Image (cartoon, grey):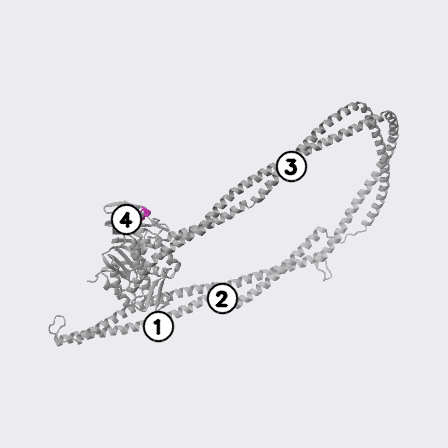
Amino acid sequence: MLLESIELENIRSYERERIEFPRGITLFEGDIGSGKSSVLMGIEFALFGLGSQKPEALLSKKANEGVVTLNFEANGQKCEIRRTLRRKGESVSQDPKSSYLKVGDVLEPLSPSELKQRVLQILRFNESEDPRSESRIFRYAVFTPQEEMKEILRDPSKRLETIRKAFRVEDYKTAIENSENFRRFLDKQAGILGERFHDLPRHEEELGRTKKSLEDCAIITGRLEKEKARLERQLAEIRLKVEQARKDREKSVRLSAEIKNAQAQASNREMEIAKISRELEDAISEISRTEKEIASLKEVTRPATTNLERVNCLIKEFSESNKAKHELASKIEVLSRQSAVLEREIGQHALAGADDLETCLDGLLAEIASLQSGLESTDGQIVECSKLLTKYETNVEEYTRDLGQIRSLDSKCPVCESNISHEHKERVERDREARLEEAASKIGGISEEISSLQSRRVTLKARISEKELERDMIRKIIPALKKASENAVEMQAARIGLERLEEVAINLEEEIGPGDGKEDPVERLATVKEALLRYQNACDRIKEKEVQKAKLAQTMDCRKMEIESSRLEMGRLCDEIQKMKSEIGQLEGLEARTESLEREEAACQRMLGEASQDLARQEQTRTSLEDKKSGHENSIAEALYWQKWYRRYSNFHEWLSKFFIPTLEQIERQVLLAIQQDFNEAYRHWYSILIDDPTKESRIDESFTPIVEQDGYEQDVEFLSGGEKTSIALAYRLTLNSLIRRGSSTMNTNLLILDEPTDGFSKTQLAKVKSLLMEMNSEQIILVSHEKELETYVDNIFQVSKDSGISKITRMTGRP
């Protein structure tokens, strides 16, 4: 792939800019923040979409629409791709209606996701077509920001993740992680299934006992059925005999019943008379006792005029008042302690209000912001002066060198060998001396200005520190002042409440009357309440006893009349009993025989009922056992089902743990080891070009970590100089580039983009960049850097500048 041109419209700091990319080595140079990296972001966005970039970061803040149009050549085809960003409200997204891909003369309107798929086909990148993913081959073979590569080297986990993604072996790790997750899922499921069949032995044991109980039940049921049939035959025979004797017995039974009834009535009457006589005696005694109790109860007097309900109310009010007084006193004590602590914290600001301090704080913040603005302006002036100083120092060196060369000249020109007059030589020498003197004068002036600016910078920083200390102190005091004010309000409210409760307590004591001064009002009211309860109970008992006495007198009159009536009835019943006894004497034998038969019938009937009940119970037992048996059989079947799945899950779990996961890990190690060998060889090659120090060597270990050794001792990369760190990061970056390009058919020798590859390089290291660029052997190399020394090593130069927040690109003259 080779880049032809790119058009940026409202992309970051660019309003409208078109860049034609030439072949060879091209340098984009400019100050930090001038917009160099924005060009690279536009290239990646045009080819592969947003990826992990945010659309808000690409679209200019001042515009509602931004467009990137990229022309490139891939596999002999001319291609043009266009993507559009559009702002809608607060969000920014790609506009699918304004996106297209043109291959040759064929225009293909495509959505943003379809554009990425089509570009990957054209470039023959075998990668994920997910619009949110970055292009691995482009990011590691064409363009990787230098700072991102340094971050990868500092973070071991991110480094290995990058290696896996770059060489497409991350699927092993993904498979291992997925297998681990599935193994944990199987382990969890096996535990759940194990719980579902852990009762299987108990169910099997219970099923055996249930079957044995069913067999015993069948034996008992057969025996009871035989006993029932025998009793039914015996009962039928007894009933025939009873029926024969029943006719003879009817008269005897009737007479016996009538005698018993009459005797019972007579006995009842006699018992009633004795009972009523006793009740009369008890009633007389009860009346006497009641009269004595009434007299005793009337001796209880009323202790006070206040009723019981008011006493209960007074007790409740006194208790609540005492509780509230205690709570308010505790609250006042706590608030007093808090106020003392806050006063110590506030100190001399106690008289100032929180609003005044907040106004003062706003003024301080404005003053700090003004001072920081002045500091930034001073820093900018120091930077500009330093640039001018470097420029004039370079001029001094150049003029000094020219003077030396002029003074060493003979009478002939070393180029054309023509004669040089003494006057011409003096004239040129005076011109160089004048220029040297002017440059030296300007260096002195600029140095004085830099010294003045640095003094001003120190003064500004001191004032900012002083104001920030004052700001922090006020921020700490304002909450304390507010809290002290709130505590004062709460204490005043608590004291007012306490005074009101004291007044309420005085009024309540006046209502219950004076005491001895020592007894608590609540205890005094409890004593009055107890006496009132006794008096009220006595009054209620008197009323009950009066009613009871009246009822007893009425009862005595009724019982006397009942005694007389019962005596008359007893005489009549005795006559009837005597008459029936003479009639029943003739039926004595028949009665005994009939009663014997009836007893036999009742006994047989009872035994038959018991046998029927036993049979019914046995049937219920059998039904219950059958249900129990069915339940155990179902539980056993279900447990066996879950046991089968448990064994399957356990087998899967064992296979993953002991074979599959270890195999994947071993394969990944072998693949990474093979990559590491090629990686180490390529890395050592690039490192040897960048760092020409025979005492230092660097290699890549098994975890793809760069190891630096000096005189046989390992050195921590973090302790190396900035240029050495950049060299290691660049060597690592070029190693990734070369190996990935080797594995991609479309990335053989075409395009390479390096962003700030020489950050921190010394002049000696910068001199090696030329041989490094030649070693890459790429048809098109794009460098982004602020190092002007690179101008002599490139074919084309583009100057990137920013004026009033808008970036511009100007093509300069390259090397001859």
Give whichever of 219, 364 is nearer the camera.
219
The residue tagged 3 is 216
Q: Are marks 1 and 2 in contact (CB under 8 Å)?
A: no
Give whichever of 82, 338 is nearer the camera.
82
Q: Position of residue 240 (x, y in %)?
A: 75, 24
Which quadrant, please, contains the C terminus? Answer: bottom left
The residue tagged 1 is 455
The residue tagged 4 is 122
The prevailing secondary structure element of the residues shown in magenta is helix
Q: Which mark is residue 352?
A: 2
Say which residue appears at 38% left-offset and 57% top-offset.
160
| The quadrant where residue 617 appears | top right
* Badge 3 amino acid: Asp
Q: Position of residue 394 (x, y in %)?
A: 25, 70
Q: Secondary structure at mark 4?
A: helix
* Badge 4 amino acid: Ile
Say which residue appears at 83% left-offset and 48% top-offset.
295
N-term-proximal mark, 1 vs 2? 2
Instruction: Report if residue 443 is visible in the image.
Output: yes
Mark 1 vs mark 2: give the one in front: 1
Mark 3 vs mark 1: give the one in front: 3
N-term-proximal mark, 2 vs 3? 3
Asked whether residue 114 is drawn in magenta, I would say yes
* Badge 1 amino acid: Ser
